[in-house]
Image (cartoon, grey):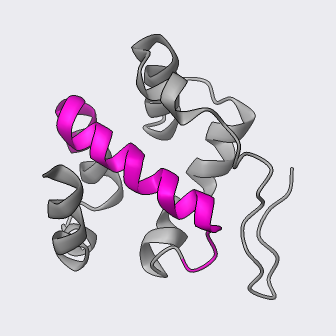
Amino acid sequence: MALARPDGAAYTDKYDNVDLDEILSNRRLLVPYVKCILDQGKCAPDAKELKEHIIEALENECGKCTEAQKKGTRRVIGHLINNEADYWNELTAKFDPEKKYVQKYEKELKEVKA
């Protein structure tokens, strides 16, 4: 498994071509990703990779993300906010219990939600 190098290099782009449309339009595909990230289920390799970098990506404003990862993140967040509010609330409770990142990215999150 390729991880971000300590020299500040970008996260692996190995999964940048995952078909987000297919995943987001099919709960049977989406729910296992969410459950993995919430520690409620098994993790596919791409979900495990994502899970390992969530906190760091929040802290550094996705500074090591590729452009595809930044765009994909916005799409996934928008989908979760608009279509999977319960999972979105569970994810924010797990990764941002003090709501400091939600506050930090509030403007962007509102744009995604609109």
The quarter holding residue 4 reads: bottom right
Residue at 45 percent of width and 78 percent of height: 61
Inspect the magenta stretch and tell me whether residue 70 lies in it. Answer: yes
Viewer-nearest residue: 48 or 26? 26
Relative image position of residue 12 (x, y in whole percent): 78, 60
Residue drawn at (79%, 62%) of the image = 3
Side (left or right) of 86 relative to 14: left
Residue 99 higher or lower than 44, as above or below: below
What residue lies at 19% left-to-right and 67% top-to-bottom? Answer: 99
Q: Is residue 84 left or right of residue 56?
A: left
Judge from the rendering whether residue 45 lies leftward or rightward of residue 1; answer left or right.
left
Chief secondary structure of the magenta span? helix
> Does the segment drawn in magenta span residue 47?
no
Task: Tally the numbered discs.
Answer: 0
Rendered view: 1 above or below 82:
below
x and y percentages locating residue 65 in the rendered image: 61, 69
Tell me if residue 4 can be seen.
yes
Residue 104 percent coordinates (x, y): 23, 79
Given residues 5 and 114, the one toward you in this image is: 114
| The magenta segment | 63-89
Q: Nearer the viewer, residue 100 or 16?
A: 16
Residue occupying the point 49% across, 40% down? 37
Q: Is residue 40 visible?
A: no
